[in-house]
Amino acid sequence: MKLALLFGGASYEHEISIVSAITVKGKLKGFDLSFIFCDQDHRFYLVDASKMKATTFSRGEHLKMPQIFLTNGGFEQRGLFGSKMHTMPILNIIHGGDGEDGSIAALFDFYGISFIGPRKEASMFSFDKHYTKWLANSLGVKTLPFEAITQDKRNAIATPYPFIVKPSRLGSSIGVSIVREPSELEYALDVGFEFDEVLLIEPFISGVKEYNLAGFSARGEITYSIVEEPQKAEFLDFEKKYLDFSRSSTVAEASISEALVKQLQNAFKTIYSPLFEGALIRCDFFEIEGEVYLNEVNPIPGSMANYLFEDFNGSITKLLGALPTKKEIRVQYDYIHSISCAKGK
């Protein structure tokens, strides 16, 4: 079965995407894999499997590889004596901007390319944590209270200390700070605004239980991963999350009650269906006094959350066989023809 891994992109998480793609490559067996790298200037390169290592991209070696171009149905490799088409489903592993903000989804829809990943509408709600909370709350899934602030509102924060400051449209804990007292606030805001124009302010709850659950839908049935309780200090910082992107061994299942597992799965299903059809996502939850709260949605989780699935290879195969299709519209020009006939032209 043919499959291409798409990675890179113009994003603060560009390097993480490379690490994810390399990890996923090692987890997928029995596929006829291709590798498409998107650089920061939005040029696409067809990467040889033997060159799938981080230094290939940090040293610019990809520039010597064939450049390919989006066209109807796939990618075109152009040469002096003609062109070659590359048509296969795409596994979108571009984290952050481009991959998760709807840009790639819109391009693939436009060019009629089949892909695993969030669609445009799902990207809109999951890329911006502000909108994710709106979505969850509208569906009856609880989230922590929050404030969304911009530069002109930085002096009007009402949330009591301690609280967390996080960029609204960024992952991997980049730009995230815990603020315990007023003397720490200005620096935390400066860091956050380096990465985004909108910051979320949320109460920081020490010792809160956190659980991760991934899954996808295929032919109307959701396949859930195991539930993981991530090991952390106060929160998962960039260093710890960066290591997650290279994980390839299945993690230990959280030791929790069946009732809590059901709560987490029900919340996941409520968020997933039908908005995220065609994507494998991971939802990160808090559990506070027996209640489940959505923390965030990862529409393209690091290394596709392979470490949460007993059979990641089989999961991708199953998802590939049930991707949503876009209704094809064929223009007939009936209206223009009818007008022309009426005018005798």
Image: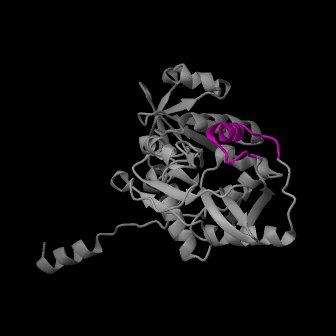
Q: Quadrant of the C terminus?
A: bottom left
Q: How many marks?
A: 0
Q: Is residue 266 magenta?
A: no
Say if residue 120 shows up in the picture: no
In x, y percent, where is residue 305? Answer: 71, 49
- Which span is picked out in magenta? 232-250
Task: Choose between 236 and 77: the one closer to the eye.
Answer: 236
Q: Main secondary structure of the magenta part?
A: loop
The residue positioned 64% from the left and 24% from the top of the image is: 51
Display colour scheme: one colour
The residue positioned 79% from the left and 52% from the top of the image is: 309
Q: Which quadrant holds residue 239?
A: top right
Along the horizontal axis of the image, is 319 left or right of 343?
A: right
Task: Choose between 29 and 21: the one closer to the eye.
Answer: 21
Along the horizontal axis of the image, is 334 left or right of 70?
A: left
In x, y percent, where is residue 134? Answer: 50, 69
Task: Choose between 228 and 341: the one closer to the eye.
Answer: 228
In x, y percent, where is residue 261? Answer: 80, 67
The residue positioned 41% from the left and 24% from the top of the image is: 80
